[in-house]
């Protein structure tokens, strides 16, 4: 089975200059759509679960669905990642479930709104790194706050990442990857007008800490054809706007290696389900609408794997294990 530490995946992406998508999942159809896209494009893939997703599935259901993806695809490189862990406890839970990577989002306090001080963020992140690295598990930290609105992850102030602080943060905490705030936000309403991202920040951090994998959160592109489809079949998402794929590709050139996508897959599923409900009102077998939803996720993610440059890289390297990274961290 090729369940790999996320660090290996991101290091390999760094060597060849491409990005790896990290796709949020909550159910079987999303997982199957994503891994089918990975298989067909020959892409390594990060499957990630938020705390909300773990709660929704009572932990154990999602764990087994993710593990099923690994078992069903022995030749695919898959990293299982905790998205937006808020404290050491959630990280411990994810590691006990078998995740190969965790995020500790120390940028906001436990209310999910108020920014933490640099010092507090660095302390909590360092304690997670000390814990996770004992198991060979990769750690992603976050410095700066994302803009925008996504349920509980809604900063009250948007603070872009300061490159010098990022360097200090990485040296002090020992994180393997760093989520940077460059003007993106979670959800379907990222921008009101033409999107602008502070890609210079990515460039500067990459120059200061060249080996570090940078992470773009809020990277959904909110494809307008998906918005049109949702709206056509009774949805109401006026003015939704995301990150243009060209900006993501530019960010990859500057050192972004992990690209977080959740909203687009939600949109793809919703459009497909609404279409079935609207066009075939006699259907009531969940497979009749969840099947098309799964296919829509597959089509969407396949395009992303090509656009991020991930396609064709699954077989570039041999998988290492958590035991291997555990030994490397100990050294
Ligand atoms: O970072 C936010 C992700 O889109 C996860 O969202 O907490 O609603 O599962 P969620
Ligand atoms: P989107 O809402 O843009 O898909 O971002 C997802 C994300 O950053 C998950 O951590
Ligand atoms: Zn995020």
Image (cartoon, rainbow, N blue to C red):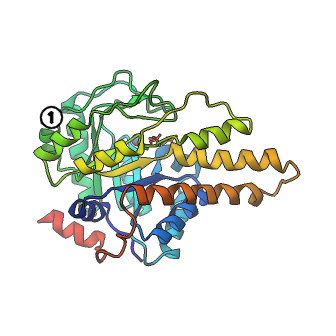
- Mark 1: which secondary structure? helix
Q: Give above or below for 25 relative to 316.
A: above
User: Which residue is rendered at x = 63% and y = 49% of the image?
Assistant: 269
User: Which residue is rendered at x = 32% and y = 33% of the image?
Assistant: 197
Residue 105: which quarter of the image? top left
210 and 321: which is toward the camera:
210
- Image location of residue 326, percent across then percent down: 22, 67
Residue 124: which quarter of the image? top left
* Quadrant in which the N terminus appears: bottom left
- Image location of residue 170, percent across then percent down: 16, 45
User: Which residue is rendered at x = 20% and y = 31% of the image?
Assistant: 118
* Few, some or many residues within 10 Å of mark 1 (<14, 14–19, 20+): some
- Image location of residue 109, percent across then percent down: 34, 29
* Quadrant in which the C terminus appears: bottom left
Is residue 111 in sight in this rendering?
no
Name the residue that disc number 1 marks: 165
Quadrant where ligand 3 appears: top left
């Amino acid at each position: 089975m090729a369940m790999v530490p996320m660090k290996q995946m991101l290091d390999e992406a760094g060597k060849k200059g491409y990005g790896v998508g990290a796709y949020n999942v909550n159910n079987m159809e999303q997982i199957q759509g994503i891994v089918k896209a990975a298989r067909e494009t020959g892409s390594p893939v990060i499957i990630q679960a938020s705390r909300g997703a773990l709660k929704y599935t009572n932990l154990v259901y999602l764990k087994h669905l993710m593990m099923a993806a690994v078992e069903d695809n022995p030749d695919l490189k898959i990293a299982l990642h905790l998205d937006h862990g808020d404290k050491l406890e959630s990280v411990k839970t994810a590691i006990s479930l078998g995740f190969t990577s965790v995020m500790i989002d120390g940028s906001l306090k436990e209310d999910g709104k108020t920014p933490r001080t640099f010092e507090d963020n660095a302390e909590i992140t360092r304690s997670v790194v000390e814990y996770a690295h004992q198991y060979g598990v990769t750690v992603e930290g976050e410095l700066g706050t994302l803009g925008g609105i996504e349920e509980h992850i809604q900063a009250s102030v948007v603070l872009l990442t300061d490159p010098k602080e990022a360097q200090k943060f990485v040296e002090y905490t020992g994180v393997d990857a760093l989520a940077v705030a460059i003007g993106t936000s979670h959800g379907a309403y990222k921008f009101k007008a033409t999107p602008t991202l502070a890609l210079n920040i990515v460039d500067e951090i990459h120059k200061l800490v060249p080996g570090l994998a940078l992470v773009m959160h809020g990277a959904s592109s909110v494809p307008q054809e998906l918005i049109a489809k949702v709206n056509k079949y009774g949805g109401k998402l006026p003015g939704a706007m995301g990150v243009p794929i060209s900006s993501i590709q530019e960010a990859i050139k500057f050192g972004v290696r992990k690209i977080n996508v959740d909203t687009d897959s939600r949109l793809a599923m919703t459009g497909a389900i609404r279409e079935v409900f609207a066009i075939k009102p006699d259907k009531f077998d969940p497979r009749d609408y969840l099947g098309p939803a799964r296919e829509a996720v597959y089509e969407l993610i396949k395009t992303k794997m090509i656009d991020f440059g991930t396609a064709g890289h699954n077989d570039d390297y041999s998988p290492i294990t958590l035991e291997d990274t555990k030994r490397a961290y100990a050294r």
